[in-house]
Amino acid sequence: MGNVGGKGLSLARRLYASRALGLVLGLLCVSAAMYPLNPAPWVWGVMLFNGLLWPHLAYQWSRRAARPYHAEHRNLLVDAFMGGFWVAAMQFNPLPSATTISMMAMNNVAIGGLRFLLAGTAAQILGIGVGWLIFTPLFIPETSQLQLYACLPLMCFYPLALGLICFRQAHTLGLQKRELLALSRTDSLTGLLNHGAWKDQLEVEFQRCQRQPQGGAIALIDIDHFKSINDTYGHVAGDIVLRQLSKILRQNLRATDVAGRYGGDEFCVILPNLPLGSAAAVMEALRERFATLGYEQSPALTVSLSIGLAAFNPSHTDATRWLNDADQALYEAKTSGRNRVICCGDGRPEHELLDSV
């Protein structure tokens, strides 16, 4: 119900300005067509009410309604009815009548598509019928030059205003769509890519490595004894540790590197165009920096990382095998004492790997 109400209020606000502009311009058009017919004073009163007061009354009506969306659709049908009424009152003067009907139809299509166009057309026909009963019009086949000029502002400015409203709505919807897409690919706690989005990027990187000789590496990062951190210091402290790691990753990686949260306390990084030894040095620097962090909420808390690295292997048939290599290296890092960087197939800590290159 809240979403419907918000949608209705948004629609009412969008239509308020366009209705006010359209009916003021429409008043000029209708007045020029009605003046030669010497209408009764009450007709002038209805014209002034419809052109000057109705837009504000309609907006307040929608704004205060229990269901603003439905109230605004009702207001649009009133607009259409009055448009048909003035067509009959103008004795079907060709240009003012065609301008009134077409502007109403354009408005109804823009708001509700074909279905609402049909509903608006029915309301216009009803308005014409009521006007016919009141005025018993005779068809006026000619439009004077004054009436022609009186129609031009409505024909020129109202479509421009309606187009601007539609553009703003489309632009807003586009921004919301992009924001939703970003949210669907982002881990809410850390702000990094989520599991699925990172694996999509891994597939892209795997395909690139197959085409180009530069290669690359991937790293899986595990926070040592994370369950014990949650059990001892609480889940709030655990969340702080996760956010700290994501912050360290953003600060220490290149713009071309891709970091994500693989799940739970496990993170993942794609390091394009980086040899295994250089990637190991980057991960070791990250491990050392993270180990020196302090936590104001839990001064006794110290946290270490176990990291598994794997270089791109041209013999791999898919990205999953590359990921399995990194996972195996991470397993070796955890089973050999934790708090270290291990490269796939090497089984040695990072500093020994660097000494051998």
Image: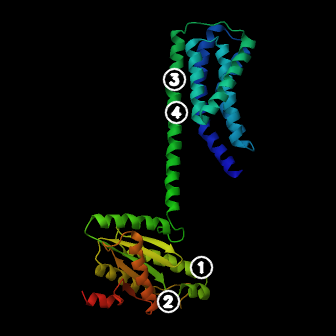
- N-term-proximal mark, 1 vs 2: 1
**Amino acid beneath label 2:** Thr
Looking at the image, which residue is at 52% across and 68% down?
187
Q: Which mark is residue 302?
A: 2
At mark 3, the secondary structure is: helix
CA distance for labels 2 and 4: 61 Å
Q: Give the residue pinned by disc 4.
A: 161
- Quarter of the rendering containing residue 56: top right
At mark 2, the secondary structure is: loop
CA distance for labels 1 and 2: 15 Å
At mark 1, the secondary structure is: helix
Is residue 311 left or right of 112 when viewed as pictured?
left
Looking at the image, which residue is at 61% across and 16% down?
31
Can you see residue 179?
Answer: yes
In the orientation shown, which residue stands out farthest toward the bottom?
337
| Colour option used | rainbow
- N-term-proximal mark, 2 vs 3: 3
Can you see residue 53?
Answer: no
Determine whether label 3 and label 4 are within 8 Å by CB. Answer: no
- N-term-proximal mark, 2 vs 4: 4
Q: Point out residue 247 in the picture as x, y percentages from the top left corner.
A: 45, 75
Q: Which mark is residue 155?
A: 3
